[in-house]
Image (tube, rainbow, N blue to C red):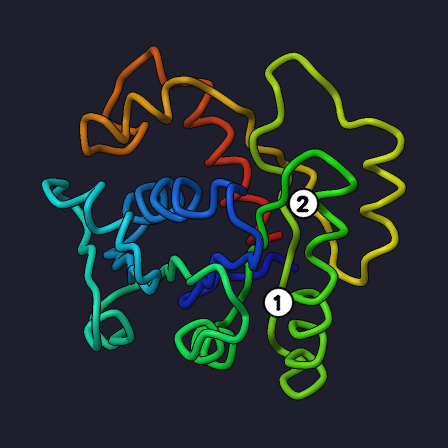
Amino acid sequence: MTASLPRRLAVLNTKGGTGKTTLAVQLAAGLARRGRTRLGDLDPQGSAAQWCASVSGWDVVQGERAWQDDDVAHLVWDCPPSVEHAAAGRALQQADAVLVPVLPSPLDLWASWQLVDVIQAERRRRPTLRAWLVINQLEPGSALSTAMHDALREFGLPALRAVVRRRAVYRTAALQGVSVYELGPRAAAAVADIEAVIEEMQT
């Protein structure tokens, strides 16, 4: 049975540098091709809102509007890098699904233990909450190491088979204030990565 895509998706990690905002922006762009989408920038740094200030096709909002989902098919939250932050807690409580980007290093993954514990506690409270780890910024052409596979298995959260590779085109997209979907053939591999994540979230 095929699951539906989450209506409210929280992209969350308590560790900085995992590419959380980049992933949230690109997922919002991909979901916008499936239905009206809003990207809620909950991070006090406001990076997502700055990035997408001129993007058309989906809303990028901050403040109270970031929580409104009554007129959209998909709402993606770029959460603050702290599980103690009130906005992160609220997003976790209201999300249909949580996506945790982690770098392809066991040390980086283990730094997310506290967050995984918090997500698991919320899943015990709300068994319908879906959650996944996703490997982000994997070097092109490289495979996940045996150590990384072993580390992933130690967590109670499933890891997506789809991975997002490190690509210079994401920096290009940020500089131009667009998503990779707007960059044509040179971004085809990046688009394929994001599409694979979206597709797997509904299996």
Q: Nearer the viewer, residue 72 or 180?
A: 180
Q: Amino acid at mark 2?
A: Leu
Rendered residue at 65%/66% (across/down): 115
Q: Crowdedness of circle 2 by 10 Å Cα count: few (<14), some, many (20+)?
A: some
Q: What residue is pinned by disc 1?
A: 130
Counting from the top left corner in percent of width and height, residue 193 is at: 51, 30
Query: Disc 1 and disc 2: Cα gap in Å?
Result: 12 Å
Q: Nearer the viewer, residue 75 or 66?
A: 66
Residue 160 is labelled as 2
Rendered residue at 58%/61% (across/down): 3
> Is label 2 in a helix, a strand or a loop?
loop
The mark that comes first in sequence, 1 or 2, is 1
* Whether residue 2 is visible: yes
Q: Amino acid at mark 1?
A: Arg
Residue 168 is labelled as none
Rendered residue at 48%/40% (across/down): 19
Counting from the top left corner in percent of width and height, residue 132 is at: 65, 56
Residue 98 left/right relative to 72 = right
Point out the image quarter for the N terminus. bottom right
- Residue furthest bottom as drawn: 125
Residue 3 left/right relative to 68 = right
Counting from the top left corner in percent of width and height, residue 84 is at: 52, 75
Q: Is residue 99 above or below residue 167?
A: below
Q: Is residue 65 above or below residue 150?
A: below
* Whether residue 74 is visible: no
Residue 149 left/right relative to 96 = right
